[in-house]
Image (cartoon, rainbow, N blue to C red):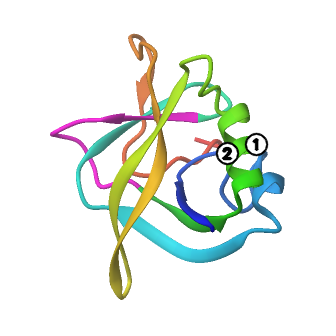
């Protein structure tokens, strides 16, 4: 059984941690239905749920249980850095329910970056 994951930062194609998803099924690009806020945390972004903000853009992947466990480790789920939660998305032709990593630590002093993360900014 595969899980569907929405990624919006360093796990996306062309970025530092994408190697973890190379052998997983890329399902296309998507955008969150609800608003969220992305913050620049240095080498990666953090998504924070918010009633105001932006529709966050990212990529969808169908991942194996082994890959999901590796992603949880990299994202610091066990340490409380990120939490994997349900997120409703729209892709060009359909609505999709997936999971995404939401940042759980303070974002005080971090720069808000809009709807899409680009580390070169």
Residue visible at 30% across and 42% down in the picture: 36
Count of numbered labels shown in the rendering: 2
Observer-nearest of 119 and 105 = 105
Observer-nearest of 12 and 23 = 23
Magenta segment: 45-56
The span from disc 1 to disc 2 (Cα, nearest Å) is 14 Å
Please give the residue where the numbered disc 2 appears in the rendered image: 10
Q: Residues within 10 Å of mark 2 (few under 14, many from 20)?
A: some
Q: Is residue 53 magenta?
A: yes
Residue visible at 38% across and 11% down in the picture: 108
| In the image: residue 69, left or right of residue 27 | right
Residue visible at 55% across and 21% down in the picture: 81
Q: Residues within 10 Å of mark 1 (few under 14, many from 20)?
A: few
Residue visible at 47% across and 48% down in the picture: 100
Q: Could you say which quadrant of the image residue 85 lies in?
A: top left
Quarter placement of the N terminus: bottom right
Q: Could you say which quadrant of the image residue 53 lies in?
A: top left
Disc marking residue 34: none
| Residue sitting at the far bottom | 93
Residue 120, horizontal then vertical, whole percent: 65, 43
Observer-nearest of 99 and 19 = 99
Q: Are marks 1 and 2 in contact (CB under 8 Å)?
A: no
| Residue sitting at the far front | 1
Quarter placement of the C terminus: top right
Please give the residue where the numbered disc 1 appears in the rendered image: 70
| In the image: residue 41, left or right of residue 19 | left
Assign a secondary structure to mark 1.
helix
């Amino acid at each position: 059984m595969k899980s569907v994951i929405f990624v919006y930062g360093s796990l996306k194609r062309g970025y530092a941690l994408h190697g973890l998803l190379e052998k997983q099924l890329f399902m296309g690009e998507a955008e969150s239905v609800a608003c969220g806020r992305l913050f620049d945390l240095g080498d990666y972004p953090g998504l924070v749920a918010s009633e105001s903000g932006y529709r966050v853009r990212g990529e969808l992947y169908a991942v194996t249980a082994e890959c999901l466990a590796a992603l949880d480790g990299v994202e610091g789920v066990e340490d409380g850095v990120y939490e994997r939660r349900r997120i409703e998305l729209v892709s060009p032709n359909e609505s999709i329910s997936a999971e995404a990593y939401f940042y759980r630590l303070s974002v005080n002093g971090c720069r808000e970056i809009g709807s899409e993360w680009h580390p070169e900014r």
